Image: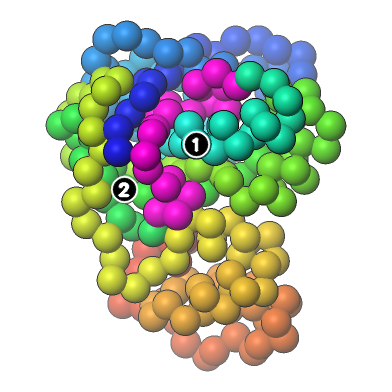
Amino acid sequence: MRVLSVNVGTAVEAEWAGRLRRTAIDKRRISHRVGVLANGLAGDERADKEHHGSPDQAVYSYAREDYDWWEREIGRELRDGLFGENLTTSGLDVTGAVIGERWRVGSAVLEVSGPRIPCVVFRNWMDEPGWVKRFTAAGRPGAYLRVVELGELGAGDSVEVVSRPGAGITVADWFRGRHGDADALRRILAVPGHDVEWDAMAEKVLGRRRPETGPAVGERPGAAV
């Protein structure tokens, strides 16, 4: 399991980039090692900090294997960084990662925080028919990561899973559950201490009544599980 490519981007003006008309989705490969800061990789910009500026979205990772699948699906070459990810990986099941598992990459430690949700900027950038629906249906969203330990990393670094919750949900479950998948929701509800927002979702999709209990002790407001 390793990092194939480290990618950063600069915010630029773009008429197609949603309400802000500004985006940094075009991430490009860098050859040098880069610092991992609390809010992401040094030199990487984010234009829409309201929706993409939280610590839970400090670094975005996407698997080369999923790119290869998409290349066959849409019939064109897809370079590393095209989906706006900072880390393009090889040999790592990014979408199968468990929310809360931690990766050591270089000298930094990153924690899986949730899936990427496709937006209008991503749709317009890709310029593929029905892109948001297709990306959602494919269930290969990649993973956002928060920074646990600062450090530095570079292309070629190994990715070591240093810890994983004993009970948890995967990035894929989170993604599909958020889009109303009943089986994914049942798996999420089986996780002790899951966020009460999932009970509200289950009430709509499965007809289950929300329990009269609050979040588990120590649970962060808005946590993924």
In the shown orientation, is residue 155 left or right of residue 206? left
In the shown orientation, is residue 224 left or right of residue 122? left
Q: Secondary structure at mark 2?
A: strand
For image coordinates 65% across by 28% down, the residue present is 71
Image-quadrant location for residue 168: bottom left
Residue 173's spot in the image, x, y percent?
Answer: 54, 63
Q: How far apart are labels 1 and 2 at the CA level?
A: 21 Å
Location of residue 139 with respect to 33 vertically, above or below = below
Given the image, on which type of amino acid does mark 1 rest?
Answer: Glu
Say few, some or many: other residues with alpha carbon within 10 Å of mark 1 (under 14 / 14 to 19 / 20 or more): some
Q: Is residue 84 magenta?
A: yes
Residue 5's spot in the image, x, y percent?
Answer: 38, 21
Residue 13's spot in the image, x, y percent?
Answer: 66, 10
Identify the mark nearer the N-term, 1 or 2.
Answer: 1
Q: Secondary structure at mark 1?
A: helix
What main secondary structure does the magenta stretch of the protein show?
loop
- Disc 2 target residue: 111
Range covered by the magenta-colored residues: 78-97
Q: Which mark identifies residue 65?
A: 1
Residue 119's spot in the image, x, y percent?
Answer: 69, 37
